[in-house]
Image (cartoon, rainbow, N blue to C red):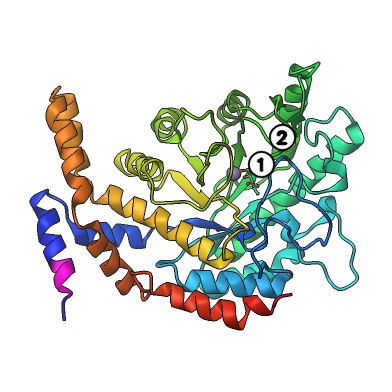
């Protein structure tokens, strides 16, 4: 039997010229790259100490994944509660070495990521990849921008190894792989040289790109940042550096919405970059007061970012990925909540009468532009969301959390 609430919502949206069936169909096609690192606080599988690079997880909620089996189980559980088919975003420090094998970042190979490929194939997921230029003895200071050639070359070799792994991911899964370069390079205090590290950073990425790879299968992105913990005064890969680098090299700029000054918004930057770059990439996060990496909420800025992607007709030009790490709550729930919120924000954008609002702007009718934008805020999007979820075989309301509670009782709580 047809769902009465959905049928009613469908009629209401139709009055605004919006086809809810088309919105549901479109949303079903959108893959978001779910970051693997929320499940274990960015620890990875190397069994080495501390998270570095100026990023930090806070909280000690029990049950974080401690090994590949646990991480894959958690990702499995999360995917089962998120509607649609997505991608998994893997970091290089999640390499899986053979028993007794010692493999450093500059010698990782595709075979160390075989289990990731198996996992992706099982879920029909694509895979994205990230070199890990942090949490390593050679990442105590600068990495790709280091004045020490031995260190800089080590990280260039790591970058090249990662390009090869990205090609392997694309070939095996059949989906292009986005490979994101981000380093925490910078200084705590006022630097004596701001130019040199940036010149070396550019040269290092040039050397990585020069390894030669299939640009239709691997999209290399460069992520900018404003500051990090312990790296407050100077960030080598600043916004201007990263954007200029990406555009001059014909690769893809990546914007993380935690990486800008508090009144800057990525929603406004999306259309600005789309004027100049065929593709752009996003790390969707929730910064509270700083780059805190809280779980993505269905908040104003997430909605506004997704509105821009949709109304710029850029769903096939923007690589969407989540990036946050909260260790103070159930980590699997954190993945599900954040991913579903991104999807809700996309649905909201798809259910917005964008052409009509734009028409009012172009006609200079700013009263109606405001009026319509405010009116549609209370339309029954939730009923369309429920329908979308049900058609994708997952629960649309919060009853999916019953599964998490069961998983916590049976699995997570047993992890000492
Ligand atoms: C750090 C960047 C970066 C990382 C991941 C783990 O501020 O956002 O994307 O979160 O590489
Ligand atoms: Zn990021």
- State which quarter of the image contains the C terminus: bottom right
Residue 264 placement (x, y as % from top left) = 47, 28
Ligand 2 location (quadrant):
top right
The image shows residue 70, relative to residue 157, as above or below, that is below
In-front residue for pair 415/349: 415
In-front residue for pair 185/176: 185
> Magenta span: helix, strand or loop, mainly?
helix
> Are there few (<14), some (14-19), or many (20+) residues within 10 Å of tag 1?
many
- State which quarter of the image contains the N terminus: bottom left
> Are there few (<14), some (14-19), or many (20+) residues within 10 Å of tag 2?
many
Residue 199 placement (x, y as % from top left) = 74, 22
User: In the shown orientation, is residue 140 left or right of residue 415?
Assistant: right
Residue 165 placement (x, y as % from top left) = 70, 56
- The residue under label 2 is 205
Is 376 magenta? The answer is no
Residue 22 placement (x, y as % from top left) = 23, 58
Identify the magenta region. Answer: 3-7
Instruction: Give residue 181's mark.
Output: 1
Can you tell which quarter of the image residue 240 is in?
Answer: top right
Can you tell which quarter of the image residue 27 is in?
Answer: bottom left
Instruction: Give residue 411's mark.
Output: none
Can you tell which quarter of the image residue 61 is in?
Answer: bottom right
Is 5 magenta? The answer is yes
Q: Is residue 277 something one can see in this rendering?
A: yes
Q: Residue at x 58, y 27 (%)?
A: 239
Q: Are marks 2 and 1 in contact (CB under 8 Å)?
A: yes
The image shows residue 12, relative to residue 249, as above or below, that is below
Q: Is residue 355 something one can see in this rendering?
A: no
Q: Identify the secondary structure beneath mark 2.
A: helix
User: Marks 2/1: CA distance?
Assistant: 9 Å
Q: Which mark is in front, 2 or 1?
A: 1
């Amino acid at each position: 039997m047809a769902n009465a609430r959905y049928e009613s919502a469908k009629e209401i949206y139709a009055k605004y010229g919006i086809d809810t069936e088309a919105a549901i169909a479109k949303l079903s096609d959108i893959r978001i790259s779910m970051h693997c690192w929320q499940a274990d606080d960015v620890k990875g599988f190397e069994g080495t100490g501390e998270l570095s690079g100026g990023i930090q997880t806070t909280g000690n909620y029990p049950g974080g994944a401690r090994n590949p089996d646990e991480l894959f189980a958690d990702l499995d559980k999360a995917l089962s509660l998120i509607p649609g088919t997505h991608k998994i975003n893997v970091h290089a420090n999640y390499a899986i070495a053979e028993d007794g094998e010692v493999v450093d970042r500059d010698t990782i190979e595709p075979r160390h990521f075989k289990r990731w490929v198996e996992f992706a194939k099982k879920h029909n997921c694509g895979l994205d990849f990230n070199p890990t230029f942090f949490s390593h003895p050679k990442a105590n200071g600068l990495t790709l921008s280091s004045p020490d050639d031995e260190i800089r070359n080590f990280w260039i070799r790591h970058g090249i190894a990662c390009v090869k792994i990205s090609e392997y991911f694309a070939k095996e899964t059949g989906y292009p792989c986005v490979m994101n370069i981000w380093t925490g390079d910078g200084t705590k205090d006022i630097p004596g040289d701001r130019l040199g590290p940036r010149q070396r950073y550019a040269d290092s990425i040039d050397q990585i790109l020069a390894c030669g790879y299939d640009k239709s299968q691997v999209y290399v992105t460069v992520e900018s940042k404003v500051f990090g913990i312990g790296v407050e005064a100077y960030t080598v890969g600043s916004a201007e550096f990263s954007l200029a680098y990406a555009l001059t090299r014909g690769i893809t700029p990546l914007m993380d919405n935690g990486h800008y000054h508090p009144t800057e918004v990525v929603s406004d930057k999306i259309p600005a970059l789309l004027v100049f770059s065929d593709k752009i990439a996003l790390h969707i996060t929730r910064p509270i007061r700083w780059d805190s990496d809280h779980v993505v909420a269905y908040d104003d800025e997430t909605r506004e970012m997704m509105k821009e992607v949709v109304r710029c007709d850029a769903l096939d030009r923007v690589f969407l990925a989540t990036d946050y790490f909260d260790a103070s709550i159930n980590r699997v729930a954190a993945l599900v909540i954040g991913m579903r919120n991104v999807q809700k924000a996309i649905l909201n954008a798809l259910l917005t009468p964008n052409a009509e609002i734009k028409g009012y702007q172009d006609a200079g009718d700013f009263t109606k532009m405001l009026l319509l934008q405010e009116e549609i805020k209370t339309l029954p999007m939730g009923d369309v969301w429920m329908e979308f979820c049900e058609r994708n075989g997952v629960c649309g309301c919060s009853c999916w959390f019953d599964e998490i509670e069961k998983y916590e009782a049976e699995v997570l709580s047993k992890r000492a």
